[in-house]
Image (cartoon, rainbow, N blue to C red):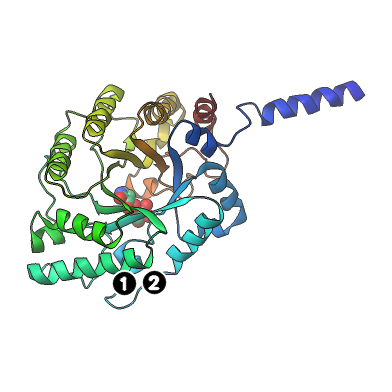
Amino acid sequence: MKKLSIVSIFLMAVLCFSSCGKSFRDGAKEKGFNSGIALAAGSFLDPNVAKIVKENSYIVVSENSMKWQNLRPNKTFWNWNDVDQLIKFADENGMIVKWHTLFWHQQNSNFISSNWTREEALAAMDEHIETIMTRYKGKIKEYDVVNEMFEEDGSFRQNVWYKTIGPDYIEHALIKAREVDPDAKLYLNEYNNEEKGNRKADAMFNFVKDLKDRGVPIDGVGMQLHLDTSYNYSEEAVRRNIQRYAEIGIDISFSEVDIRVPMDSVEAHQALQTERYLSLYKLAAENSNVKSVITWGWTDKGSWIPATFPGKGSALMYDAQGKPKPVYNEVKKFLCK
Ligand code: XIL
């Protein structure tokens, strides 16, 4: 009897510490990058969620609270509460906070107008940057300054800022942001921009290189990486893209990672999903200019995927019950090595 219980205690210990003795986030840190999670407003106030976030993140970002629609529903009302709470939580737990996003074509406030003159739009942009970046100087360490500025064919997206100001709205925002908080890292964030040879990815690289050549302040490029196992993925093309950014001194963030699968064949897609998650974490470990890997949420329950891509889901590494899936353990095993 006694022997049996010693054996079972030993087995339990082996199970608990089977991957290794360090946390997911420390494993990533030792490989040279920060792992992180995008968080729904106030979600981290739940102690069970806080525990998961502390285990996995050295960088956090708001999933929605920093967007105009939520932060600033009208011109003079600023809803700082969600972001302040996130910063407090991050400070208490040794995490850095990233801003997503200063400018975008979605989730804007109604008062933003495509009838603004160039001067009016520039003034609105400046006011937004000044108010946020002054308030959070030293507290928000990096910013997505502009999100999703390209179309798939590599042309500029005709968002309200492009229409009112013109293509130089991006450099205007970057210059202003640097002026207000010179220590903050400034990123441009995109999707489908990860593979060298893709039209959008190449257009973005050429654009960023041109900014660098002309001395416009920019530190990094975000690759959202909302992947889908039904589409092609070339690790080599992503690697070559990361490397060409390294050559021009640009950092990379894997900024919104999730890998969706068809809900009618989740199991059949599991191996491929695991392979791609591993590929991303390996690329981050391999390339010193990749500074962070952030997943867009942590549990399948809260994920934006099912509502946005009908029939797709199971895109994160924790299931809908908040339990780590086999893919999580595989990635953790890699981070522990
Ligand atoms: C998504 C959020 O996850 C959803 O909750 C919201 O309804 C819409 O926006 N690319 C981005 C993110 O840059 O801001 C988006 O987040 C997902 C796609």
Name the spot of residue 96 as percent of width and height, x first: 45, 51
Q: Is residue 183 left or right of residue 268?
A: left
| Front: mark 2 or 1 | 2
Asked if ligand 1 lies within 8 A of label 1, the reply is no
Looking at the image, is 54 positioned above or below residue 118? above
Residue underneath mark 1:
73
Residue 79's label in the rendered image is: 2
Q: Is residue 286 left or right of residue 214?
A: right
Q: Nearer the viewer, residue 127 or 109?
A: 127
Q: Nearer the viewer, residue 219 or 270?
A: 219
Count neighbours of disc 2 (C-alpha within 10 A) and say few if under 14, some if 14 to 19, many if 20 or more: some
The residue under the point 46% across, 65% down is 84
The quarter of the picture where residue 312 lies is: top left
Name the spot of residue 324 as percent of width and height, x first: 56, 37
Q: Can residue 115 be spotted in the picture? A: no
Looking at the image, is 205 positioned above or below residue 307? above
Looking at the image, is 108 positioned above or below residue 74? above
